[in-house]
Amino acid sequence: MSDAASPSASTNRSEQLTLMGAGLVGSLLALYLARHGHSVEVFERRADPRLAGPLEGRSINLALSDRGWRALEGVGIGDEIRRVGIPMYGRVMHDQHGSLTNQPYGQEGQAIYSVSRAGLNRTLLNLVEAEPGVKLHFNQQCLHVDLREQTLHLRDASTGQEKVQPFRRLFGTDGAYSAVRSAMQKTDRYNYSQSYLDYGYKELNIAPGPGGTWQLEKHALHIWPRGQYMMIALPNLDGSFTCTLFFPYEGPHSFATLQTPAQVQAFFEEVFADAVPLMPELTQDFFENPTGSLVTVRCYPWAFDDDVLLIGDASHAIVPFYGQGMNAGFEDCSVLNSLLDQYGSDWHTIFKEFQTQRKPNADAMADLAIYNFEEMRDRVADPRFLLQKKIESKISAQYPGQWLPLYSQVTFSHTPYAEALANGQRQERIMRRLMPHIHTEADYDQPQVQEMLREQMHQA
Amino acid sequence: MSDAASPSASTNRSEQLTLMGAGLVGSLLALYLARHGHSVEVFERRADPRLAGPLEGRSINLALSDRGWRALEGVGIGDEIRRVGIPMYGRVMHDQHGSLTNQPYGQEGQAIYSVSRAGLNRTLLNLVEAEPGVKLHFNQQCLHVDLREQTLHLRDASTGQEKVQPFRRLFGTDGAYSAVRSAMQKTDRYNYSQSYLDYGYKELNIAPGPGGTWQLEKHALHIWPRGQYMMIALPNLDGSFTCTLFFPYEGPHSFATLQTPAQVQAFFEEVFADAVPLMPELTQDFFENPTGSLVTVRCYPWAFDDDVLLIGDASHAIVPFYGQGMNAGFEDCSVLNSLLDQYGSDWHTIFKEFQTQRKPNADAMADLAIYNFEEMRDRVADPRFLLQKKIESKISAQYPGQWLPLYSQVTFSHTPYAEALANGQRQERIMRRLMPHIHTEADYDQPQVQEMLREQMHQA
């Protein structure tokens, strides 16, 4: 990967490439493609976000982890982004009475980073604009893609004018509701699914303390796990936290039953009591911010002949509970970059290899993301679960190279997601045999437990 | 159900209803709705099939079974259809050497019926046309459905003219590639999947014998099970059989590798040797007939407010291996008819009840259909499988009312599909315990086997 940004290989013929979508993955991909010597034209539905004035401190934030960092480092902006990211070294769980419990994410010093989506997108767009060979077009809504004729039908949102834009090779980086994928879905034998959780999410805010200080532990991801629902909070640079409530659409405690400011206030005071004093704009935020839905998209193939390729959320939108949506999309860019290094302009092989390699990993990550919702909203509140995590950390130290907790494999390694999932399932089977014999951390050193573990490690 | 065709209940207010699609399910539904006192307008993409001249003897055929019969009897055409159906009392398996094995479908006299899709559709359309209050419009391609505005955007295929057709209440009976569903898929939080098998199908023919006789057993469904692929044949009235080859798209034996008439001829002579002399037009049919794909469609909800409802393949297209696609769609009509009897013009309740009742059954049937492909192409060639079926039939006779083989529950009963699937899974668990102790039919009477069975029946 060290030569990720190196000039194109000698077998590489410069080509005119088209991207639909200049979000996080689209702008990063444009950089990678341009640095392989191609001319890249990028169309984006929204207005240029950099024209919206200075960034507010508060924003939707994302958790950057190792896969994302590698992809950013490949275009030379790892350090720049790291300076505006806030490392979170673990989870802090808030129980109903405001008591806190800590759970580190990995080994000492390992962290995921809270970064602003808008800030990251702006930084990437600045880099794209400075890159020779890339042209950016904003306000270009994609009405329709004609795969046979190889044209994009675009509508300029600022002028209302429509135009037909021919393409030779198109990358669909237009996200979970991709227009490019929509055209592919209508081709013969196209496998496609969109599946929604019965939960929605609502962005809320914890205000900064006096002088821009943080009113909760800054270097942590906060969780209020409540069984059937939860709230989380990630730190911002200005001392605020962006909270997200994940909550059922219907049922006894749901968006459907919280209809008035008084109902919201009373409910929060009952179940998130320690957070309420920190959220002066709670009811206003609750009714002003939209309720977002949580979709998982799976599809296949990702390539249409050698002409069109879907990348990122367009091919594998996932729910946000493992913090891997952006990281997976960025890893797509790293993988495609390696294939460009290896195969030059042999797009047939590049597209085929890309989807063959990435599809099982995207499917595994989609499953893991749904699984982690349950863990976060329910299991992290269980002392037995936290004990198990501590024991796993001990096993990992005792058997280095043979046991990496699933969370670490996903977050702090580059092990393909499908492999991580399989390893995780094997480890979970071992823990299910071990845990009935463990009641305290000290039990780990019992000869009986150690003997059992040795056996299991041998077998598996 | 005896009053299925009775005049509308007194609570029933006559309404103007719109159907998109006049295939098998659409025309049957139009009859049911009209007989509840509603005015029904039906739009169909294709030309009127009755204008295409007399039916040929050969055609795509369907297997009608009890659920389908009940729905046809509800509009009074059971007997008429039965006269042109050919009862098939069981499967006849053809092995590589042309040896035959029989497996009855149910008890003595129970059969599924081979009927011509085109003939059935014509009969239904004649009935629809004779029904007061129904209006049929052919050549009406649905370009777009506006769910909010409540309009169908139609294009007349004979004149090219487009028009906007308002609707008050719309039924989407437009099949697996439903335009109505396509509009619903774009609404918020819509769950949708389309999933293709890696297999395609090709229609072929076995010619009639001298004087319109049948060259294979007439009253059976013929199967050439070959592990990874298979051919089947259903009898027609003119002495011919319509064959269908279910075959992988790719791989060593696949559509991809059969490219020339010589290759097709050689392959069939090798694997379907006893059929080849009966198929004089084999290679011609193979290259002239299109290769069909095999899709499963799942979606939810099926209703949009109280305005639009999907019925039949539009909401639950399945693969054809259980012969239940049409039967499930017809059962939709029976269920809706009962709800109309019960709730009159309370469409809100009717739509809600319909999708709540039918969705789990449609999902179960989709799973069963995929499962049965494996059974037909592989397991029916296994003597142990056939022995198990015989033993199950003995259990069924010994424990009447307590054990109905899964196939019979699906085909010869009105047990909801989801319940049938659950019963079938329980029975399969019992058989897995029993069969290791059974090596011949006679073993069934061994005291040890009988004791074990008694125990299992008690537990379960």
Image (spheres, coloured by chain):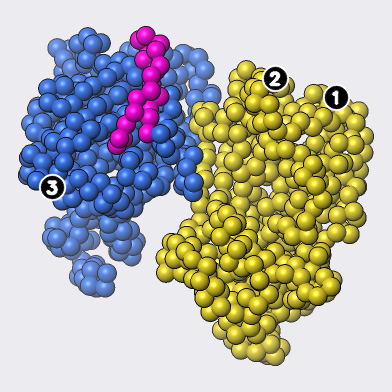
Chain colours: A blue, B yellow
Camera-nearest residue between B79 and A89: B79
| Mark in the foreground, 2 or 1 | 2
At 80% from the left and 47% from the top, the residue drawn is B53
The tag on residue B14 is 1
Residue B221, position as x, y percentages in the image? 71, 69
CA–CA distance in space, label 3 to label 1: 72 Å
Classify mark 3: helix, strand or loop: loop
Q: Is residue B245 left or right of residue B352?
A: left
- Residue of label 2: B166
Q: Are marks 3 and 1 on the same chain?
A: no
At 83% from the left and 61% from the top, the residue drawn is B85
Check the image and report above or below for A42 versus A350: above
At 57% from the left and 46% from the top, the residue drawn is B297
Q: Is residue B244 left or right of residue B409?
A: left
Is disc 3 in contact with disc 2, using a CB cutoff of under 8 Å? no
At 65% from the left and 42% from the top, the residue drawn is B175
Camera-nearest residue between A98 and B88: B88
CA–CA distance in space, label 2 to label 1: 18 Å
Is residue B391 visible in the rendered image? The answer is no
